[in-house]
Image (spheres, coloured by chain):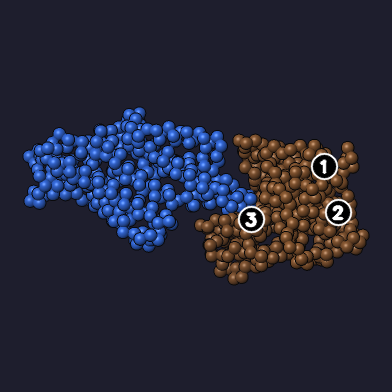
Amino acid sequence: MQNKTLPDKAAHKPGERAPVILNVENLKTQFKTNQGLVKAVDGISFSVHEGEVFGIVGESGSGKSITNLSILRLVPVPPGRYAQGHIHFKDKDLLNVREEEIRMVRGGSISMIFQDPLTSLNPLLKISIQIEEALLQHHKMSKKQARQTAVELLRAVGIPDAERRMDDYPHQFSGGMRQRVMIAMAIGCNPEILIADEPTTALDVTIQAQILELIKSLSDTRRMAVILVTHDLGVVAGTCNTVAVMYAGRIVEQASVDELFANPLHPYTKGLLASVPRIDAAKKRLYSIPGAPPNLIDLPEGCAFAPRCEKATPLCTRAYPPETCSFVHADALGEPRNPAEDKMPVFDDRHVVRCWLYSEGSNL
Amino acid sequence: MFARILKNPIAVIGLCIIVLYMGIIIVSQFWLPFDPLEMETINMLQPPSVKSGHLLGTDEFGRDILSRIMGGTGISFLIAVAATALGGAIGTFMGVWSGFLGGAWDRWIMRIADVLFSFPSLLLAIFVMAVLGEHTYNVIIAIAIGYIPQFARISRGAILSIKNNEFVRASFASGARKSYILTHHLLPNIMMPLIVQSSLSLSVAILLESALSFLGLGVQPPNPSWGNMLSSSRKVMILAPWTAFYPGLAIVILVLGFNLFGDGLRDIMDPRLRNIQ
């Protein structure tokens, strides 16, 4: 972890600030159900920079996937509803553009891969048809060109004997290979952002490493930003530049990956890190955060984590903590970091946390 | 697919019967033993005999029954196929959009289907015939309307079961249009139940057509149809049972053929039954 080196990016001078390409601002996505209003995403803001691998971690039901579906406006409406917020991509607000426009963004400038490669491909269609479909959707090209491009894509994602395998059906591929096919489909139109929603959850560990390596290298060679949703902190450590920790529909802490692992602030983040098995620590039992994630219907006024938090004060249950932001240039060893000497471009050097422990209002 | 049909004896028997009737239709276009419309009052109500050449006997006007059955096969088949195709197409169209879009669309389309469903199909067909008037082609419409809710229900259910599959979401995420997803990803995946339903609907259409003609609403005399042959034989049935027996047999065998084929198809396409002896 400590000596994580990131590959050089030709696109950026070291230490240069990478431009923001996606800016999510106070996004609220809600679902109307018979039991009440589910606030799946409750006012989150973040920015993704060019070439950045932005990780979103959190438990099941913390709103990770809904955040991503909201970016492409894929949340079914109704029962879903984009109650508030903006998603700025280039000069557009994706929540307010016409259906035709968002359709061109989907798969064109922003594409997505899903969790389960076994069901993400139509079992009745040859994979060639499915890859070409994505290409023809966004480009004017002949079938022949599309096929040629599709073969190149399959090669690019490391499928051996690509030309012959083009006419195979999904069931003739293994899980890892199918996820590669999905990635080939996703990068076909040279997207600026790739959203990967738990891309390795359904795969075994060795394949998982290969797929993550592939995503990472594609991100580097194509200067593509990646939003990587996962609940695996190991994946985050090895792949991401910036991490946002989500809890009950909100981002509770966000920092660069080195900063977050070295200096976690929010009790929830600390709990998550403590529950990761470590090879160098001889603990008998693994730590687990007591309690269970809250029901997203009728969330209490205060911090949603307060009922499970060891450091909770009466204030925590009364009001939601404001954002506390610090600019920390410290790496894992605590030495001050000079951005100009760093090998990687600077994406976001803020360390944001939402907890009363770090807020000036805590003595209220 | 075809090889699997050949391995299923039930489907093969059904298919043979259907092919046999199709052969009769083709032959009847070029050759019939007698003119089905020509009346020979001298020969009325002749019992079946090889000697007279009337293999299945004659009716009360002296018309050859075999010729009339053969002549009526084509129109029965045409009505059954056209009605199933029309009702199937409209019903499937409504059903897939209903299931795919959900919400208010779904509720309205399904309530309309429920209303249509609440009528027995024969009653519905009689009602439609009364509105449209007695004409052969109106029979097609009358039967087809009864089929719309059946196909709508089946296709809606099938769509609901697959529309949340990840490949559908993935296709949305790659920017595909709804109509594209529907025709390229969803429809091919629900073809199996629709094909089975079609083959079973064909047999019911044969019965409905016969029933309408029997009631005098379908194919109009003197043109031959199995239904109106049965109808006209009512008066002489005790005297000349063959006038009712053979047209009835023609209906029974064809309906049996379609049903066997449909059952066979269902067994073939249901993976749970595939490996059971």
Circle 2 Cα neighbour tier, 10 Å, few/some/many (<14 / 14–19 / ≥20):
some
Kind of residue indicated by mark 2: Asp
Q: Which chain is blue?
A: B
Circles 1 and 2, Cβ within 8 Å, touching? The answer is no
The residue where tag 1 is placed is A313
Secondary structure of residue under mark 3: loop
How crowded pointer 1 is (Cα within 10 Å; few <14, some 14-19, many 20+) is rated as few
Q: Dot 3 corresponds to which residue? A: A115
Q: Position of residue A338 (x, y in %)?
A: 92, 60
The quadrant the N terminus of chain A occupies is bottom right
Residues at discs 3 and 1 both on one chain:
yes
Residue B10 against residue B200 in the figure, above or below: below
The image position of residue B276, as x and y in percent, is: 38, 59
Query: Which amino acid type corresponds to the residue marked 3 in the rendered image?
Result: Gln
Q: Is residue A50 left or right of residue A184?
A: right
Residue placed under numbered mark 2 in the picture: A349
Given contact means CB atoms under 8 Å apart, are the residues at marks 3 and 2 in contact? no
Q: What's the distance in space between the residues labelled 1 and 2, CA to CA?
A: 29 Å
Q: Earlier in the sequence, mark 3 or mark 1?
A: 3
